[in-house]
Amino acid sequence: MASQLAPERTEDVGTTRVPALFTPLTLRGVTLKNRIVISPMQQYAAGRDGLPLDYHVAHYGRLAMGGAGLVLTEALCTSHQGRLTYSDLGSWDDACIEPLARIVSNVREQGATPGAQILHAGRKASVQRPWDGFEPLSETDLAERNEAPWETIGPSALPANPGWPVPREMSQADIDAALTEHAEAARKCREAGFDVLDIHAAHGYLIHTFLSPISNQRTDKYGGSLENRMRFALKVAQAVRAEWPKDKPLFYRISCIDDEPGGWTLDESIVLARELGEQGVDVMDCSSRGLGLRGTPVVVPREQGFQVPFAERLKQETDLATMAVGLIMDAEYAEAVVAEGRADLVAIGREALNNPNWPVHAADTLMGDAAYEGVWQPRYGWWLSKRAKSLEAARREQSGK
Ligand SMILES: Cc1cc2nc3c(=O)[nH]c(=O)nc-3n(C[C@H](O)[C@H](O)[C@H](O)COP(=O)(O)O)c2cc1C
């Protein structure tokens, strides 16, 4: 059955068959040159204004040079209140459009498709940078770094972790404002020229907390039944879609399971994905967990591709494309995920920080020297091909063959 779902299109580079991982994927009017995506990764490198710096332009350009088809930015926070830290990138001000456009043009110039992610951190906002502790901001941070904590919001007045600040339960006016902020963020990403937009509704941030019955204990039309808990998530998709061009794909990142008793389930994710498809979402970006409760025992064991089964199930049960993410490290494994039709795209996170050339190295592994011609950009590939031949000749000489 899996082979029926495998990508149909393959091309040859010389006499070498192009692996499924390096076949293009067209979503609406956008063609990704291959199936490798750089997963959104916050850098906590911005100033208080949330504007991208030269660092971000270089960082995303470097990732694009590594050969990924799609480079997604880190989460662009939709409001001051929706930031995690004082160093997050923001999409709350039109001033972000010009520097974001510099990221777009650099990523595109290096051969990848530029995408952005948008986020409201909800009750997980107002925390320290990871290297400052990653704990909620307190009066100590105000004294030491002039970083005052701010009020967080959520569907219910329930903290993410014991001892964390209790968020304010959102009123209808807060919900309306959050919808407008997501739509406005989409407009700015459109004006900056991104080709893909990913809505972050995973990892315990605002939208996720509406979905999960653990964090959403409202008794109004946004809480209780699955239909009610999905209402905010669907309204965000609708508001964003209205601002996002019809010829550009919309991705939606969810935590497919909470992995906690009484939490959000995979079956609910399938219902949500179908409804999101009705709102014009094209790709389900399949992550998991993160609602809170640090230290909760992990039920799904951590191993290569541990979240791929979620992408596979959503792909089987809906009409949407899927993206798998999470500990995808080996080229052969990533190739099998796409070739077997388990996901349409694979996203690489920490592996790309470790090795920004992961995509072109994956091509080396899967295609041998043909990768220099077909996948590496010529300024590197031409020389590396010569280098490979010289090394091979030297090896033969040494071994006397
Ligand atoms: C430094 C860092 C920052 C991250 N920031 C984001 C983010 O902004 N948005 C998001 O959806 N996920 C974020 N993630 C999660 C990654 O996108 C990815 O899902 C996760 O790291 C698992 O993939 P990996 O095993 O390939 O790293 C972050 C991960 C890391 C390591």
Image (cartoon, helix red, strand yellow):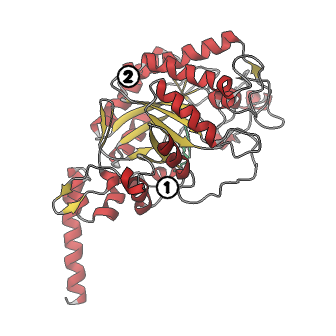
Residue 51: x and y, percent?
Answer: 49, 25
Residue 372 image-quadrant placement: bottom left
Query: Quick one: SS at disc 2?
Result: helix
Q: Name the N-terminal-most of marks 2 and 1.
A: 2
**Residue at the disc numbered 1:** 328
Query: Quick one: SS at disc 1?
Result: loop
The type of residue carrying mark 1 is Ile
Q: Is residue 357 above or below residue 52?
A: below
Tell me what residue is drawn at x 43 percent, y 16 percent.
243
Disc number for residue 192: 2
Q: Which one is nearer the viewer's eye here, 243 or 93? A: 243
Quarter holding the N terminus is: bottom left
The type of residue carrying mark 2 is Ala
Q: Is residue 371 above or below residue 62?
A: below
Mark 1 close to ligand 1, CB under 8 Å? yes
Separation of disc 2 and disc 1 at Cα? 30 Å
